[in-house]
Image (cartoon, rainbow, N blue to C red):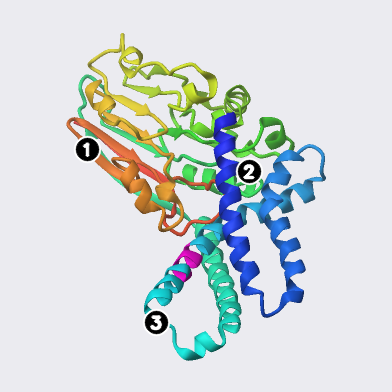
Amino acid sequence: MLVFFSVFFAVYAAINYYIFIRGWQALSIFPHLKIVYLIVFLFISLSYIISKFLTDRIPVIVYDTLQWIGSFWFAFMLYFVLSLVLLDILRLLNHFLSIFPASLVNNYDAWKFGAFIVVIVLTSVIVAAGYINTRILTVKNLEITLDKKSSPLKELRIVSFADIHLTAMNNEKFLSRIIDRTNSLNPDIVLIPGDFVDEKSDWLDSRGIGKSFFRIKSKYGTYACTGNHEYIVGIKDASKFITSHDINLLSDELVMIDSAFYIAGRDDRSKKQFTGEPRKPLEELMQGKDENLPVILMDHTPFGLEEAEQNNVDLQLSGHTHHAQMWPLNYITQMIYEKDWGYLKKGNTQYYVTCGVGTWGPPVRTGSRTEIVNLIVNFK
């Protein structure tokens, strides 16, 4: 935890300093605005951190306001940095090649201020559009065929969603819409592969966030596994929240459903990082199962996909990546993960990695859509 937060704060401070100093330089034509800029910048950039440190010591409305401001700031940071890097590249090219016109060179301070305003306006438009995008729930319809083996089932309707990240932004109203859409798909079973929360259970309960989970309607119930954010918040607290809302949490467990198929849920691979204890090897998790029944595995983080294939898992459902959530970071997740979003088949094992239904940090999506997976499994 110490290493994780040390790295986070170091990177956060460095990025904010870069943004701040470029803005400060852009105001050279209006030096009287610099003190206002300093105050506003410090307030906005520190809002999220302040809210986390003072969670239980400030009024609800103050906490929520700081959360909203601080969360949106993460999105502004990304697009401010991208814009500033582009401008700095142009400045570097001008230094060597003199590409700027004379009108710009002779009025450099005015042009800097103009660029400052343009970047703020364009970034605001992008972030606003990204926020609207997060509120539009989409359903990904997918139909696959699994080996029937000895299962009596001909079809299984699975609704799956991951990465809810319940917070002041992704609140009960948002969750209620997710559950309404889930129920409208008439699932036989609901599977949630991790990242339920970004707040403590007491905080969520005091806001009534999570009540909609009780409204899920399905034949076989709702099953889940942990994500990395359950460990960041505190695994005991997060597990308590999940199980207290009528959800079956599979912690390195395998369960048989109606003598027809298995559902397995793995602890997230971040377990060792946060608790010092490794998660159970998949091979050990699969021991003792009836080889004549299909296995559906939930594993939050889609690393090491070959492990499921090697252990004869029929279908793996994952999340975690958000497909990077904000463009152009999806190019990075595509390099990190074998499959950062969508369907994949390796040997006899099929995979679906969802880009998630909620958001982490900023409630902004510019590189993906909010996604509920409606999965029709045919057994043959």
Given the image, on which type of amino acid does mark 2 rest?
Thr
Q: Please give the residue where the numbered disc 1 appears in the rendered image.
A: 345
Where does the magenta region start and end? 82-87
Q: For the residues carrying marks 2 and 3, which lies nearer the camera in this image?
A: 3
Residue indicated by mark 2? 167
The residue lying at 35 percent from left, 41 percent from top is: 353
**Residue 197 seen from this side:** no
Residue at x 45%, y 23% (from the top left corner): 267
Disc with the residue nearer the chain's start (2 vs 3): 3
User: N-terminal of the two: label 1 or label 2?
Assistant: 2
Prevalent SS, magenta region:
helix
Could you say which is closer to the camera, residue 199 or residue 276?
Answer: 276
* Number of residues whose C-alpha sits closer than 10 Å to that of mark 1, classed few (under 14), some (14–19) or many (20 or more): few
C-alpha distance separating marks 1 and 2: 34 Å
- Residue 120 vertical placement versus 39 (above, below): below
Foreground label between 1 and 3 = 3
